[in-house]
Image (cartoon, grey):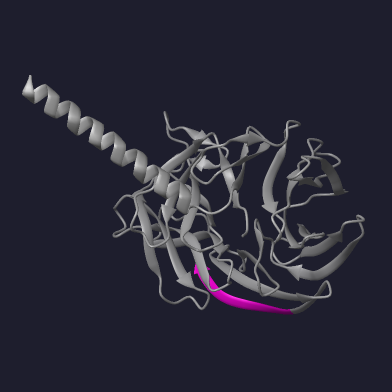
Amino acid sequence: MKYRAWSLMVVLVTLVVLALVTKVLAADLPGKIAFVRDGNIWLAKPDGSELEQLTKAGNNSKPCFSPDGKKVAYLNESLDMEKISDAIWEMDLATRKARKVISGGMIMTCCYTAPNRIAYLEPGHGIIWDAVLKEVDASGKSKIIAKNIIFSQRLQYDIGRKIFYYGACDEQHELICCYLLSIKNSRCVSDEKTFLMDYGGGHHIERIVSDSSPCISADGRTLYFVNHYKPNLGDDVITRLMSMDTKGNSRRVIYQDKSYQGTGEEEGVVVTEKGPYGELDNPAVSPDGKWLIYEERFRLWLVSTDGKSKPRQILKKAYQPAWLPN
């Protein structure tokens, strides 16, 4: 009887400690996040609580918040492949009213450059260096910021009025170049290459190291990215979340896990639209630089940027996270 009472007490104390830890963690996480689920934009706290579906029409992707945190913009992707007409929509988070900002052609990604201005990227006619960066204001008037820039899957805007973007910068797609583009009065002032990342041409299974999916901290000083690593050529791939400064120095492992090894064509292998299970992707850093949310297996995971906490799953059927700025 005494043993049972002692066991029950241990269980109760453990549950109380876990509840307190969870409460402290939730209190330490800043703001909210937006993410995609089933083609719609959702909102939640960074611990995965207080879920709210913002859109219901479907075919929405790549949410981003305005600098003042009052609006969220997102892409609505065209289903007509013969006459592509993607659109950027934005929603007022106070009223939950959405409006179409601009449409027409293919739009790859977008980010706010001011509370009432959104930069977006259109592909050009070339393979790599022919994308066009534009900016649209609240009235729907669009202008070109920069031409002939690298085709990028992500745009970010930092406090120094610089747009961060990246993409393959050689014809073999073996190097990723990361850039900080300075703008003033909706015009490109400078386009600074910050560093190179070894991507491996999509064949990281045969290579020792490859980097992908970088994002930049709010202060523009630190890069967070996914790294695929093989200690030896015959070993399994280890996928890691890493950080480094914008000069390419001080590389540091935040979290690592064994990844999938293979092409995705083997019998019995589950392959999603994002690639084989086991791939980390789309890291997003919190405004205070203390936390990362990343996507793996169509789930969102939370980990501290100092690497001292173990990753914690916060949401299922979720991808493309974006963090609400302070």
Q: Is 305 left or right of 6, judged from the image as shown? A: right
What residue lies at 82% left-to-right and 63% top-to-bottom?
Answer: 134
Point out the image quarter for the C terminus: bottom right
Point out the image quarter for the N terminus: top left
Nearest the eye: 207 or 2: 2
Q: Position of residue 307 (x, y in %)?
A: 36, 59
Looking at the picture, does residue 236 appear above or below residue 267?
Answer: below
What residue lies at 57% left-to-right and 36% top-to-bottom?
Answer: 50
Q: Is 202 left or right of 19, judged from the image as shown? A: right
Q: Residue furthest top?
A: 1
**Which region is colored magenta?**
190-197
Looking at the picture, does residue 321 appear above or below residue 229?
Answer: above
Where residue 39 sits, quadrant-wise, is top right
- The secondary structure that most of the magenta stretch takes on is strand
Q: Position of residue 105 (x, y in %)?
A: 84, 49
Could you tell me if residue 200 is visible in this image?
no
Q: Position of residue 259 (x, y in %)?
A: 38, 47
Nearest the eye: 143 or 91: 91
What residue lies at 67% left-to-right and 48% top-to-bottom?
Answer: 62
Looking at the picture, does residue 320 appear above or below residue 292?
Answer: above
Nearest the eye: 198 or 44: 44
What residue lies at 46% left-to-right and 47% top-to-bottom?
Answer: 26
Nearest the eye: 18 or 217: 18
Could you tell me if residue 284 is visible in this image?
yes
Residue 191 within the magenta-colored segment of the rendering: yes
Where residue 45 sits, quadrant-wise, is top right
Q: Position of residue 142 (x, y in %)?
A: 89, 60
Q: Residue furthest left?
A: 2
Residue 64 within the magenta-colored segment of the rendering: no
